[in-house]
Image (tube, helix red, strand yellow):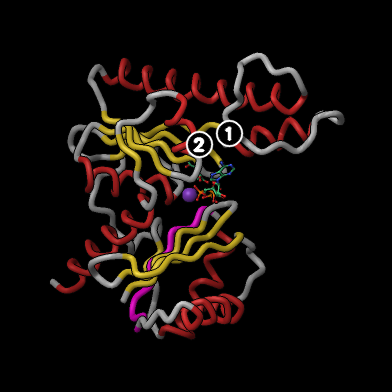
Amino acid sequence: MLLAIDCGNTNTVFSIWDGQEFIATWRTATEWQRTADQYYVWLSTLMKFQKVEADITDVIISSTVPRVVFNLRVLADRYFNTRPMVVGKPECLLPVDVRVDEGTAVGPDRLVNTVAGYDLYGPDLIVVDFGTATTFDVVAADGAYVGGVIAPGVNLSLEALHNAAAALPHVDITQPQRVVGTNTVTCMQSGVFWGYVGLVREICARIKAERERDMRVVATGGLAPLFQQAADLFDEYQDDLTMHGLTVIYKYNKELADK
Ligand SMILES: Nc1ncnc2c1ncn2[C@@H]1O[C@H](COP(=O)(O)OP(=O)(O)OP(=O)(O)O)[C@@H](O)[C@H]1O
Ligand SMILES: CC(C)(CO)[C@@H](O)C(=O)NCCC(=O)O
Ligand SMILES: [K+]
């Protein structure tokens, strides 16, 4: 079975894929200091607790934090006796072309998202991921990755206000009842929530105009449903899009190796 690891700047998600479906998914905060032994204690405890019986033979990793890759490699080697595939490394091939400026190290999560989007929905896509940053990534008519947009994440925007202004509290994102807030918290929520609705609309409209075609907008990330409730921003929502992309890339490389 495959252990797929999606390491973002805030959270790291581990999923076990049995070849047909994900049989378990666990999330932990991303901390580069965590050792392979710590990961394994955590993983094996959860597996026992949830009675997940999985013989992990393969590991694939996408990490936006380069420093964590070392310990995840050791985890794969020491506890699962396998060399992991690491998205973004030359030996891990992608089933699509990547057409960006030479020397650009595109975040592996962005590449994985577009591979997943293309696999599920076909070409001419905008994939929006609400993670630490909010990313928009474009899949062309031939499935190639052709670039995108990086915007500050929703929670990051709220944190930035709190960190920079002494009188602004820590606030969680929610859809405010009104646009005009009548206290500090609702004023901040309104700025970020409605500002974000506008940001997503404008960026998607401009991408479509620039590419001179209609494109499907696919969203992923925990906050996407909150925005979709308020405005019709997305055509599709796929909660485990990045994980799906990891399985597609795994299969692609496995088939190449078996040839
Ligand atoms: N209504 C909400 N308010 C605040 N946070 C929410 C809400 N709904 C979901 N979330 C959060 O959204 C996050 C979704 O995780 P996701 O993997 O999309 O991004 P992330 O882990 O924050 O970023 P990264 O992948 O860059 O580490 C989770 O941390 C979850 O707690
Ligand atoms: C933009 C983030 C932080 C989104 O997770 C990640 O994809 C990343 O660190 N990217 C590197 C730069 C780039 O994608 O061009
Ligand atoms: K993510």
Residue found 35% across the figure and 40% down from its top: 237
Question: Magenta residues, as a range?
Answer: 55-64
Q: Foreground: 234 or 138? A: 234
Picture disc at residue 134: 2
Q: Amino acid at mark 2?
A: Thr
Asked if residue 78 can be seen in this view, the reply is: yes
Residue at the (21%, 71%) spot, across then down: 257
Which of the pair 138/40 is nearer the observer? 40
Can you tell me whether the CB of the residue at mark 2 lies under 8 Å from the nearest atom of ligand 2?
no
Identify the residue under disc 1. 152
Kindly identify the amino acid type of the residue bearing the numbered disc 1: Pro
Q: Residue at x 57, y 44 (%)?
A: 132
90 relative to 241, above or below = below
Give the percent coordinates (x, y) of residue 230: 47, 26
Mark found first going from the N terminus, 1 or 2: 2
Q: Are marks 1 and 2 in contact (CB under 8 Å)?
A: yes
Instruction: Examine the image and state in which quarter residue 39 appears.
Output: bottom right
Answer few, some or many: residues within 10 Å of disc 2's Cα (few below 14, many 20 plus, some between 14 and 19). Answer: many
| Residue 99 falls left or right of residue 256 | right
Is 60 inside the magenta-drawn segment?
Answer: yes
The secondary element bearing badge 1 is classed as strand
Query: What residue is at 36 percent from the left and 18 percent from the top?
Result: 205
Question: Is 17 on the left or on the right of 104, as rendered?
Answer: left
Q: Position of residue 97 (x, y in %)?
A: 25, 44
